[in-house]
Image: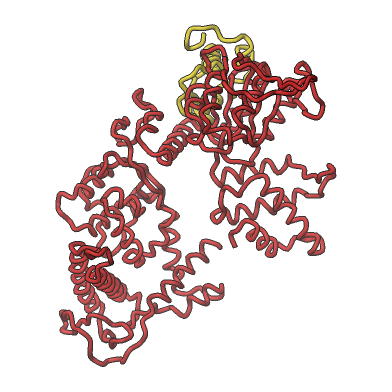
Amino acid sequence: MSTNLRKLNVVRQYVNNDVIEKGGEGSKGGKVIGHTRSGKPVYESNGSKTPMHTESYTADDHKDAGKFHQQLYQKHSEKAESTPTRTDKGEKNPKWEQHIQTRDHHDQMAIKHRRASRGELDSNYMEKSQENVVDKIEGKVISPFKDFLMKGLLNTADLVKKQITAKGKNGPYQTFRWINNKTNAAHHFEGRYKHEKDIEGNSDEEKINNVVANKKGQNRAQQHRDLMSLGVYDSKVHGDLLGDYKYATHLQKNELREHDFSNFKEQRAGGTNLPTDVPTNEKGEVDYKSEDFDINDIKEEVSAKDYNKISKFQKKKIGEELGVGYKDRWDTYNLCLNAIMQTGRPKSLIAYGTGGVGKTWDMIKAMEENNLRVYDEELHLDPSEYDAVKITGNTSPSDMYNVMYTNKDKLVVFDDCDSMWGDADAENMLKGALDTSGDGTIRYANPKPLAVNEDGKKVYPPKQFKFSGTVIFISNLKRTELPQPIVNSRARTIDLSMSMDETIDKLNVIKDKMKLKDRLGNDMGVTKDHMNAVIDFLKKYKKNLDIEKVNGRTLSNLAMFAKVNERQNGGKLDTQKYEKQCAVLLDIA
Amino acid sequence: MAKDGGEQPKDVKSFVKKMSDDELQKFIASSVTEDINNGKDELLDAAIDECKERGLDVLQKQK
């Protein structure tokens, strides 16, 4: 679904949700909660069961009415906060629920009056151009909503993220604020939101710290609004910083809908608590250049998920500073493959990250270019007749021990053998074999027999031997899922994980080298045009796709779809039908 | 010389000698974006030594 269509659907939902049935126009009734300065009554509700009463309201009347609802909203917010959410029996407290419902009602009413005061809603609180929304969705008419929509689009399109480290409830907290790339200021919301310049503090961090510290004793809602005013849009971050997830969610769900907050979904970049002893620079950012900074320290103190985030962020940042992109990392992978095959150094290499995008392909190519003879089980080769062995799939510790014993002076490739990780025996064996300062001794107490000799006796490998060969591990796992002693001090590691754009870019390069053949080795007739159709589809729907499903296998499968589609459509690709087929295959339809 | 003072394997030296300036700098730059590895990295050490020998900036920004 395109961005515009998604936005239109949001608007449609908004309109559907907020349409209020017309009541008896002009009739009186319902509870009066106050009067406007011009003397008109402000009713508690104008739902379908109570009469409408705002036809004669001026913009100022709406503003006044909004204030009454706002007061009641505050009142019920405070009452809800001071009322236990559960009864003694553990059931939901009906009093608390009543306050929440009333709070939300007045919140909605305050919003509607403010919008009505700006002329965005008619006297029945209906969108003035509601009928045109449907037409717009069908692509027929550009309604007055266009400005509203385009404004939203432009607002978010101009925003760029800026890293900040604030003082969170639990110590340093790293997140982002979103600012306009031209003005360097956060988006300014109307209504009860301050302009960021009016929030106390000399720097971004100081302003956020002041909001969190709340020395002025603002109510919690205003703290959340101030964070919004500073360009912090993620409800999780609000919760982490202010210790209140519930209200943050409420704000985004209800109040900010007035500002078409759906536009800011992309800006919910998350944040994470940092350990307190991580060095920071003057701007409060993590100082990865500091001699005191060791990313391994972070792992001890944060969850694996957070470590991954920080690690990824740091790598990206260092990479950006040095101009290292994903292509450079792949070049380094290829260089290391050649180095290990030509010089035996590094002694071991772990290439990990996005699966199905060429790690194995590059490795096989390097073997061919370096004239390595790869073991072929069917040929029963003697050790002197091959240089390398490639193991794929399930591998137990005893399998691994035997493979390394049999090939103790060869290049051993473990490709996608992730089942062996997490086993203490396997990890201990590898620690010994790959120790960069040791002699490569491997020990294993319970090896499996290697073979059965002519006398029917089982032949076992020794329980200890010296491994003098080299090892390449290829894995689709994340770094933190790999055995840490191996990745931290034994092997050379290369992170080949990629973003969606990078993956598509990589596939775009791979596609020109791919030749799809059937089991008998016959060309399957997939052309560059078929491949290009796949790339076009991936680019078009990248925001909807699961990155795990975007790989070389997907490319070949979808290319086959394109070929079949073309054949069924008289030699020309039916793009619309093809996109539907791909969407079904990739589970996005 | 390697970090621990030991000699680098001859093959590694000749391998990095064959690398272009751009390859050397790119290799070093992308190596430092990886997490810290406490073990010996003779290839990286050799690349850094070679970079210095050629009078290149070790951490040159990539184009």
Query: Which image quadrant is residue A375 in?
Result: top right
Q: Which of B10 and A458 is in front in this view?
A: A458
Q: In which quarter of the image is residue A448?
A: top right
Q: Quadrant of the N terminus of chain A?
A: bottom right
Q: Residue at x 54, y 7 (%)?
A: B7
For residue A467, side relative to residue A318 (left or right): right
- Whether A495 is drawn above or below B45: the answer is below
Above or below, A336 against A9 in this view is: above
Q: Is B2 situated left or right of A104 in this image?
A: right
Pick whichever, B51 or A262, lies toward us: A262
A383, A299: nearer the viewer:
A383
With respect to residue A97, does A302 lie above or below?
A: above
Q: Position of residue A456 (x, y in %)?
A: 77, 22
A227 over A366 or under it: above or below: below
Q: Where is residue B5 shown, x and y percent of the image?
A: 48, 7
Q: Colour of chain A?
A: red
**Res. A92 image quadrant:** bottom left
Specify whether B35 is left or right of A563: left
Asked if residue A398 can be seen in this view, the reply is yes
Chain painted in yellow in the figure: B
Q: Where is residue A288 in the image (x, y as percent from the top left)?
A: 38, 30
Residue shown at the point (24%, 59%) measured from the top left: A221
**Tag count:** 0
B33 and A246: which is toward the camera? A246
Which quarter of the image is occupied by the C terminus of chain A? bottom right
